[in-house]
Image (spheres, rainbow, N blue to C red):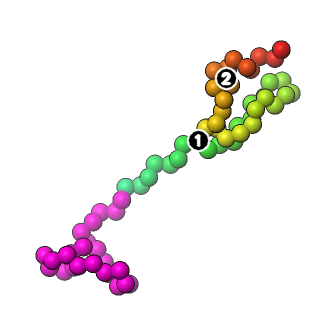
Amino acid sequence: MLLGNSTIPAFSGTAGNLSCRNFKPAPAKPPPKGGGFVTIWVGDRVLWQGPEDEIPPRFRDGDDLNEP
């Protein structure tokens, strides 16, 4: 970090009033995807419950969604 008009780098971890004019703020992180809780029903039966990103492939494909 450069302070003032100096060309020599200076680092300070304890100055509470230090302002930095050499860096732009980091871009905002995109919101996380998934993370919802899912319940898969067929009729009045619950076939599976759990986090959205852990849905078994057989339920994502729709193979086990038919009642016997």
Q: Quadrant of the N terminus?
A: bottom left
Circle 1 or circle 2, nearest the eye: 2
* Residue 17 visible in the snapshot: no
Residue 44 is situated, as x and y percent measured from the top left of the image, at: 86, 27
Q: Dividing the picture into quarters, in which one does residue 28 lie?
A: bottom left
Secondary structure found at label 1: loop
Q: Amino acid at mark 2?
A: Arg
Task: Classify 10 Å Cα crowding around label 1: few (below 14), some (14-19), many (20 and above).
Answer: few
Residue depicted at 80% across the width and 24% down the height? 42
Task: Report crowding for label 2: few under 14, some 14 to 19, many 20 or more residues within 10 A (C-alpha).
Answer: few
Q: Residue at x 71, y 39 (%)?
A: 50
Q: Quadrant of residue 16?
A: bottom left
Above-or-below relation of 24 to 52: below
Q: Residue at x 77, y 16 (%)?
A: 66
Q: For this view, does 40 lie left or right of residue 2? A: right
The boundaries of the magenta stretch are 1-26
> Eyeballing the image, is 29 above or below 14?
above
| Residue closest to the far top | 68
Q: Position of residue 49 (x, y in %)?
A: 75, 37
Secondary structure of the residue carrying tag 2 is helix
The residue at the point 83 percent across, 14 percent down is 68
Q: Please say whether residue 30 is visible from this viewpoint.
A: yes
User: What is the CA distance from the residue labelled 1 to the residue labelled 2?
Assistant: 18 Å
Asked if the residue at tag 2 contacts the one at tag 1, i.e. Cβ–Cβ closer than 8 Å, the answer is no
Residue type at mark 1: give it.
Gly
Q: In the image, 10: left or right of 18?
A: left
Residue 39 at x, y = what percent?
Answer: 74, 35
User: Would you say residue 17 sits in the magenta stretch?
Assistant: yes
Please name the residue that numbered disc 2 is placed on: 58
Q: Is residue 14 above or below residue 53?
A: below
> Dot 1 corresponds to which residue?
34
Mark positioned earlier in the residue sequence (1 or 2) = 1
